[in-house]
Amino acid sequence: MLTDKAILIVEDDVYLALDLSMAVEGSNGRVVGPVGTVAEALELLESEPVSAALLDSQPADGDVTPVAMLLTKRGVPFVIHACTGLPAGVARSLPEAPLVIKPFHSEQILSRLMSEMQRP
């Protein structure tokens, strides 16, 4: 359960963003966003503290590496979802970053996120 944890969702596909949002809310989490671009995510992170994040590897304005790096710097767990693999920048800097390959069920990625949140 995500009991009132703030979960950032970065996803440019409106249907997938809605599905992920419903899964977070269904686990009693609080959705931050969703946003469809790296720029929006970085702007949102300036004012909104988050407990964890679900990140599309390639949102509308490019690779999600800047968001992943900021979250890592802040010690915020995240899971990246992608069709192929980690974005090049993340693969170089954070080769062990948690990844879920599309297609997936929202419960699958949420379970992975909760596991990441429990890591010390």
Image (tube, rainbow, N blue to C red):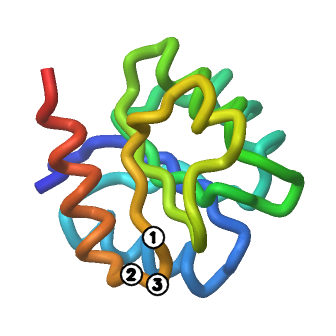
Say what secondary structure mark 3 lies in.
loop
Within the image, what quadrant is residue 107 found in?
bottom left
Distance from label 2 to label 1 (Cα)? Answer: 7 Å
The amino acid at mark 1 is: Ile
Instruction: Indicate the amino acid at tag 2.
Output: Phe
* Mark 2 nearby-residue class (10 Å; few <14, some 14–19, many ≥20): few
Give x and y (percent) for residue 74.
47, 14
Q: Quadrant of the C terminus?
A: top left
**Mark 3: which amino acid?**
Pro
- The residue singled out by tag 3 in the image is 103
Reply above or below: 91 against 92: below
Q: Residue at x 47, y 26 (%)?
A: 49
Residue 101: assigned label: 1
Neighbour class for label 1 at 10 Å: few (<14), some, many (≥20)?
few
Task: Specify whether 111 is left or right of 104.
Answer: left
Front-most of residues 61 and 44: 61
Label 1, label 3: how far apart the Cα atoms are: 6 Å
- Identify the residue shown where x is 45% and y is 70%: 101
Q: Return the x and y of residue 88 as percentages of the image width and height.
A: 70, 42
**Contact, CB < 8 Å: mark 2 with mark 3?**
yes
Query: Could you tell me which residue is drawn at 24 percent across and 46 percent down?
Result: 4
Secondary structure, mark 2, is loop
Residue 92 at x, y percent in the picture = 62, 29
Q: Residue 40's x, y, as percent?
A: 78, 44
59 and 31: which is toward the camera = 59
Q: What is the secondary structure assignment of the residue under circle 1?
A: strand
- The CA distance from mark 2 to mark 3 is 4 Å
Pointers 2 and 1 in contact (C-beta within 8 Å): yes
Q: Residue at x 44, y 55 (%)?
A: 31
Q: Are marks 1 and 3 in contact (CB under 8 Å)?
A: no
